[in-house]
Amino acid sequence: MIVELPKIFDPRGNLSFIQNGPLTGFDIQRCYWIYDVPGGEVRHGHAFKTQTELIVALAGSFDVVLDDGNCPVRHHLSRSYYGLRVPPMTWRSIDNFSTCSVAMVLSSTVYDKNDYIEDYDEFKALVKTAPRPIPVVSPSVHDPSRYDGSSHRVSNLDNCGIIDLPRHRHPNGSLSVVENVAGTPFDIKRVFYLYDVPGDSERGGHSHHVARELIIAVSGSFDVTLDDGKCRRVYSLNRPYKALYVEAGVWRSLDNFSSGSVSLVLTSEPFDEADYVRDYDRFKQLTSCKQ
């Protein structure tokens, strides 16, 4: 099923987001993206016993073929503000990749080899008898007290930095992943991404009281400036398998975007405007009073 995602128009670059709740139909447990795919290749012919997915074209375009055991249906994805929801016990493959395309997949479970069905004949046999699981979505709880000035975290830049992500190389396209397992900085509750960004734009001048982030250049390149109220550091992001970890209480801004760049951000909290500090003077006040 095609899902229309929020699209926030901005002359500095558009933004779409996805978070836990009714839009996805599941809580995000895993996020991965496929890139460097040669034209004409086919990716990921398989089904899942229990996992639900949401597939989005972050850059370029590709086709997703879904097969419920009766009739395959081809879906063309070419817009960052549309996603394709894939329920369990649905065979799916991805093909017809355009140049420099990036496919993002959000999953309802962490990686489990036993959940995969990789043989089509086995899938055809199972689909006749296996019931389709119903995804369970945890209710989001809004707690305004988390986001007032008294709860504002103060971090120094030594708590931030580049993290090497898994890079699974393959002749028909590489894959990098972040999932909610031990060793990951936080559980993913929301993803958003910037695209259609003019080369002279600056985006994202703000900090958070509570939310932490991983920022990845899944396509193209850009710079991220971090500011803890005492000093600044600039990070150049240009690889889809490297993420910049940003603590709460750090001011961050993005600029120097290359043509066709896409910034993917994974966050520890669902969207709440009260968590944002968008005024730099207010940010300086909050950090100085807690030094």
Image (tube, rainbow, N blue to C red):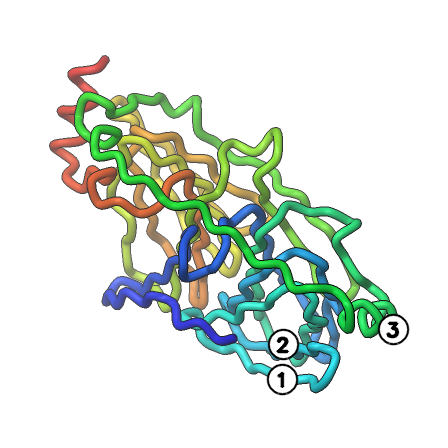
The residue depicted at 73 percent of the width and 84 percent of the height is: 70
Residue neighbourhood size for the residue with mark 1, other residues' Cα within 10 Å, grouped as few (<14), some (14–19), many (≥20): some
Residue 139 to residue 26: above or below: above
Locate the C terminus by quadrant: top left
According to the image, label 3 marks what residue?
A: 121
Residue situated in front as seen by the camera: 223 or 70? 70
Which mark, residue 64?
2
Label 3, secondary structure: give it. Answer: helix
In front of the other: 98 or 93: 93
**Residue 233, visible in the rendered structure:** yes
Asked if 111 appears above or below 160 in the picture, the reply is below
> In the rendering, at what x and y percent does residue 49 appear?
72, 59
Local crowd size for mark 3, using a 10 Å CA cut-off: few (<14), some (14–19), many (≥20): few
Q: Amino acid under label 3?
A: Asp
The answer to whether mark 2 and mark 1 are in CB contact below 8 A is yes
- Residue 116 pos. (x, y %): 76, 57
Q: Which mark is residue 74?
A: 1
Residue plotted at (45% across, 62% down): 261
